[in-house]
Amino acid sequence: MKTCDLFSKKTVFSFEVFPPKKEIPVETVYPTLEKLSGLHPDFISVTCGAGGKGGNLTVEVASKIKSLNCETAAHLPCINLDKDEVLDTLQKLREHRIENILALRGDKTPGIEPKCVFPHASDLIAFIRQQTGDEFNIIGACYPEGHPNSKTLAEDIDHLKIKVDAGASELITQLFFDNRDFYNFLDKSTQAGIRVPIEAGIMPVTNKKQIERMVTLCGATLPLKFQKILTRYGHDNTALRDAGIAYAIDQIVDLLANGVDGVHIYTMNNPYVATRIADAIRTLL
């Protein structure tokens, strides 16, 4: 099933997971996948390995999710790929009946020179459309506060419009902690003529160092309310986990009340956190 078809029927609820490191057997993630699929999300997306070179593991994990009667989407970062490698990945996805692709530029990897065959995600999206037509549903990423490499949010939304025009059928946002940033982004995207569904990406904070690293990577800002949570509970992992879950639930309730297209949870492969959130919002979806 193409996930873009779900939005006309319901508020979409989905998860993100990542494969184990290459030296760890892929089967170690299967119990996590079974628990997450048991929460009945609309789909589970699977990230790629460092440097965009974990494509085979991504396909393998996505295939396992399909076997659990849950829809899936495979991440495909292109910064270190050439055309033949992309075509090879598309064939593997086809063989495993995976119809949804999250097309990304990906992050530069220290020590690896980018191939620059696909300088931007929009180039990858256009290539997939040219090669496969409507065979695959292509999901794009977006940034409510603007991509760190963009000078302004307006400039980033202009680039996002190019991505959508190239063939992205839906979008998932990077994490954010202030819903006002998301609503402002939606307004500006609509003004720019972007009409595809946009899922809000939510990361429940369970570890202080983890979130500080993520914020540095993606450029998200921490509102004062959230900073106070980190200050008060950052020394206590259990307390911070519970406070982070409560903060995420509060965000999601507000998003649902305001008619969000969907909610995408960055689970960090933590079924306990995903379960707490799913149980809290199930009747609201």
Image (spheres, helix red, strand yellow):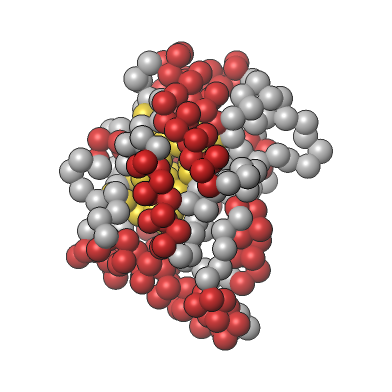
State which quadrant residue 48 falls in.
top right
Instruction: Using the rendered image of the protein, determine whether residue 271 is visible from the camera's viewpoint.
Output: no
Q: Residue at x 25, y 63 (%)?
A: 257
Judge left or right: residue 205 versus residue 282. right
Q: Residue at x 55, y 31 (%)?
A: 121
Give how far across and how far down residue 56 sits, in percent.
56, 32
Q: Residue furthest bottom?
A: 232
Give how far across and how far down residue 21 sits, in percent.
63, 48
Q: Nearer the viewer, residue 25 or 81?
A: 81
State which quadrant residue 95 falls in.
top left
Q: Residue furthest right?
A: 111
The quadrant of the image that shows the C terminus is bottom left
Q: Nearer the viewer, residue 145 or 111?
A: 145
Is 141 situated above or below 113? below
Give how far across and how far down residue 174 sits, in percent.
50, 51
Is 199 situated above or below 83? below
Judge left or right: residue 211 versus residue 71. right
The quadrant of the image that shows the N terminus is top left
Instruction: Using the rendered image of the protein, determine whether residue 254 is visible from the camera's viewpoint.
Output: yes
